[in-house]
Image (cartoon, grey):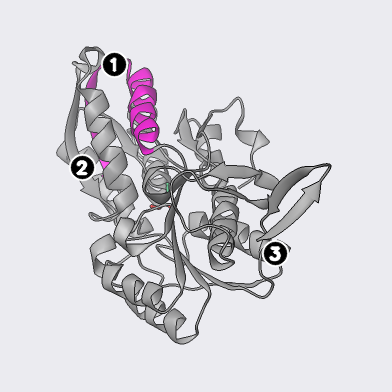
């Protein structure tokens, strides 16, 4: 950290060391959401003149990230940016990485405080969970049966959001809404598609499916778009505008939400670099700059929040391209 003296003021400039090796290990490599987040990581790494890469398995399996972490340790990466499929499965390996001086930053789906120095969260988890229910209630007219189509059963992010959905659902205004089932599509397109079909068959009077995963919501919308339930059953949740555009345009989906995954990756790359440069340690109250996104303050348990999610409808979907 250099100290600059400007007009009598002492300012601490956070210089990022050149040549830092930053690896991004998403939940799965072929998920369009991961690809967009990865492009944000790459943009950040280029700006601070590091070398970046994205590695990972094509499935979101509980232990599929382990061998990649081991390889990144061997390669002596300066930082690992990771989104957890199953925090327990990877914790010992992340501890090993940290013991060798590698800075670990969780992004999107936390690995737990013991496994990382910081967690870059897309938005406040409570806010995501509650606003998902608020949107669902609006679309359902506050009445009827609905199911959740989630990602993997141990995904930290989806489980936290579902917990907050359940808290929100206890409010009296939702008394006529009934959650009948939480199904898991494992962030696998085909499994999510089949689970959607199963839900519609098992609950013929199902009024809505809420899927807080970009893989689930797009598979569910694809199933619904050619089924007799189109226009009758509501699908909402978290999706990317590019994957959901056709379903908004053809009337299968009315509204869904998301943040900008590219900004999320960009912010995580800067956090990793600031840690690896020794400018921050991940403690609450520390601040750091993240290029064009500006200044962030580290919150409780090393958490940093990107910003607010957006709701996409036919009125604004064409303003977004990711
Ligand atoms: C999927 C993944 C990811 C989640 C998004 C909303 O792509 O499960 O972790 O943040 O959906």
Badge 1 local density, few (<14 within 10 Å), some, or many (20+)?
some
| Relative image position of residue 255 (x, y in whole percent) | 47, 29
Counting residues from the N terminus, which is met first, the one under dot 3 or under dot 2? 3
Is residue 126 rendered magenta in the image?
A: yes
Q: Which residue is mark 2?
A: 182
Q: Which residue is mark 3?
A: 48
Which is the main secondary structure of the residues drawn in magenta?
helix
Report the magenta residues as a range: 125-149
In the structure shown, which secondary structural element does the residue marked by tag 1 occupy? loop
**Tag 1 and tag 2, C-beta contact below 8 Å:** no
The image's mark for residue 142 is: 1
Q: Tell me how far mark 3 sits from mark 1, CA to CA.
A: 49 Å
- In the depicted view, which residue is nearer to us: 189 or 22? 22
Above/below status of 120 relative to 56: above
From the image, state whether disc 3 or disc 1 is nearer to you. Answer: 3
Is residue 93 rendered magenta in the image?
A: no
Q: Quadrant of residue 273?
A: bottom right
Counting residues from the N terminus, which is met first, the one under dot 1 or under dot 2? 1
| Relative image position of residue 11 (x, y in whole percent) | 71, 48
Q: Tell me how far mark 3 sits from mark 2, CA to CA.
A: 42 Å
């Amino acid at each position: 950290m250099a100290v600059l003296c400007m007009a009598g003021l002492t300012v601490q400039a956070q210089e990022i060391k050149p040549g830092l090796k930053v690896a991004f290990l998403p939940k799965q490599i072929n998920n369009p959401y991961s690809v967009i987040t990865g492009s944000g990581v790459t943009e950040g790494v280029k700006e601070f003149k590091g070398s970046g890469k994205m590695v990972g398995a094509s499935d979101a399996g509980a232990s599929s990230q382990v061998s990649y972490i081991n390889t990144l340790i061997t390669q002596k990466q300066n930082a690992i940016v990771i989104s957890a499929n199953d925090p327990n499965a990877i914790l010992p390996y992340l501890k090993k990485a940290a013991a060798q001086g590698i800075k670990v930053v969780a992004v999107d789906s936390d690995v737990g405080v013991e496994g990382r120095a910081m967690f870059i969260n897309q938005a406040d988890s409570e806010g995501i969970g509650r606003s998902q229910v608020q949107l669902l209630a609006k679309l359902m007219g506050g009445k009827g049966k609905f199911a959740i189509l989630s990602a993997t059963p141990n995904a930290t992010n989806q489980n936290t959001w579902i917990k907050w959905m359940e808290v929100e659902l206890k409010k009296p205004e939702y008394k006529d809404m009934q959650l009948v089932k939480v199904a898991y599509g494992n962030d696998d397109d085909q499994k999510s598609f089949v689970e959607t079909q199963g839900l519609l068959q098992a609950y013929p009077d199902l009024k809505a499916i809420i899927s807080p995963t970009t893989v689930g919501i797009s598979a569910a919308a694809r199933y619904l778009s050619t089924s007799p339930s189109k226009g009758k059953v509501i699908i909402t949740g978290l999706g990317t505008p590019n994957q959901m555009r056709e379903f908004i345009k053809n009337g299968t989906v009315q509204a869904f939400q998301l943040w900008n995954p590219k900004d999320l990756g960009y912010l995580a790359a800067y956090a990793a670099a600031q840690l690896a440069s020794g400018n921050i340690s991940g403690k609450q109250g520390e601040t750091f700059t993240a290029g064009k996104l500006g200044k962030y303050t580290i919150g409780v348990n090393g958490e940093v929040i990107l910003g607010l999610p957006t709701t996409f409808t036919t009125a604004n979907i064409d303003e977004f391209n990711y």
